[in-house]
Image (cartoon, rainbow, N blue to C red):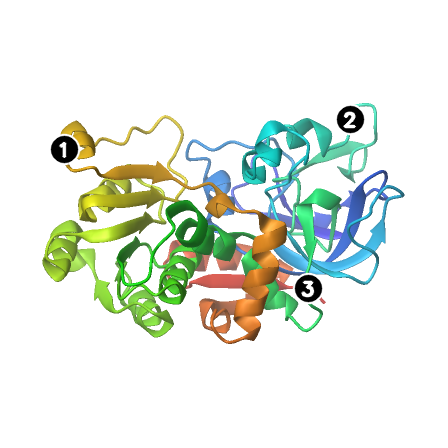
Amino acid sequence: MRAALFLDGQDDLVVDEVDVASPIGNEVMVRTAASGLCHSDLHFMETDGWVVPRPIVLGHEAAGVVEEVGPDVSEVQPGDHVICCLSVFCGRCEVCLSGQPYLCVRSRTECVRSSEEPARLSRGSQEVFQFANLSSFAELMLVHENAVVKVRDEMPLDRAALIGCGVTTGTGAVFRTAGVEPGSSVAVIGSGGVGMSSIQAARISGATTIIAVDLEPRKLDTALRLGATHAVNPADGDPVEQVLELTGGGVDYSFEAIGLALTAQQAFGMIRRGGTATVMGMIPPGTKVEIEGQELFMSDKRLQGSLMGSNVFRVDMPRLVDLYLDGRLMLDEMVSATITLDDVNDGFAAMKAGDVVRSVIAFN
């Protein structure tokens, strides 16, 4: 199969042939229909504190059609349309049984192949590593069945792919992590795929004031179409001061979707007394976030993280599909470009330039 590889000595991805094994045990072979380009992949390509072994096939936001299953698979069968998710879970550990499968760590040993078994991906005699147990920048994905969820056949797979990461992260932070209430006020820093999803989730939740914060005017325009009631551009002045002025003292909930210490601190600064700031972005390892300690206990403010939207993806993703098909979750408007696998590096260049909300690789 063809796949986009991240190789030693290369800054860009290299599209080449990769061998994929046949499914065994609880494994599922998925023919990739579409894969979104997520900023998380770019973090690892730029190695700004995030490191992966090489050679590796990146990509983790995907949907496709089940082609073959291992003998122990019970959740799906060939022909099923599925969304893949990096929140692979074992289903038996304490966090899984407590309703937090997105925090499962046993999946790292129980949902992968052992060292005695042949690698899932290879290139000649060399093992090719999987990214997030998925590797969706490839024509085929060989994954554990606990990395997929079946969805309705009528759901367009190029839109379903977005739900695999960015949409689930952004909506889940609103629905599950923060629990935004009707009538509340919300600010979202960053209007990429994750931020746009949070804006939409805030609208669906009934928030009455939804403030989009971004440096790109085109993204702010899109945010306003997707549900934001106000747009704040940091180029016009301190975004915290702008939000405080708009709201008369701060929002009930803020969400950070960029992954910087500065924007995490700004998210905390934007909330009112008793408010909650939720960080979704990938802040680089070793980076410290500084806030005024007295703001925590004197103002009852909260600063919290959200990993993949605190998802229970086998429940959440079909619901998000329903919201899209009902017209309440707008995904078409989030796709800025549809590209081929050979265009993957151009897609990341557009991401770095701030030209797109989401680019989606469509496979034939």
Q: Residues within 10 Å of mark 2 (few under 14, many from 20)?
A: few
Residue at numbered disc 1 = 298
Is 148 situated above or below 361?
A: above
Residue at numbered disc 3 = 363
Quarter-of-image position of residue 199: bottom left
In depth, the one of 128 and 63 nearer the eye is: 63
User: What amino acid is found at the position of numbered circle 1 in the picture?
Assistant: Met
In depth, the one of 307 and 139 nearer the eye is: 307
Q: CA distance from mark 3 to mark 2?
A: 30 Å
- Across and down, in percent, residue 231 comes to 23, 65
Which of the two discs, 1 and 2, sits closer to the camera? 1
In depth, the one of 27 and 205 nearer the eye is: 205
CB atoms at circles 1 and 2 under 8 Å apart?
A: no
Is 253 situated above or below 201?
A: above
Identify the residue at image location x=46%, y=42%. 43
Identify the residue at image location x=35%, y=74%. 225
Q: Secondary structure at mark 2?
A: loop
Is 322 situated above or below 273?
A: below
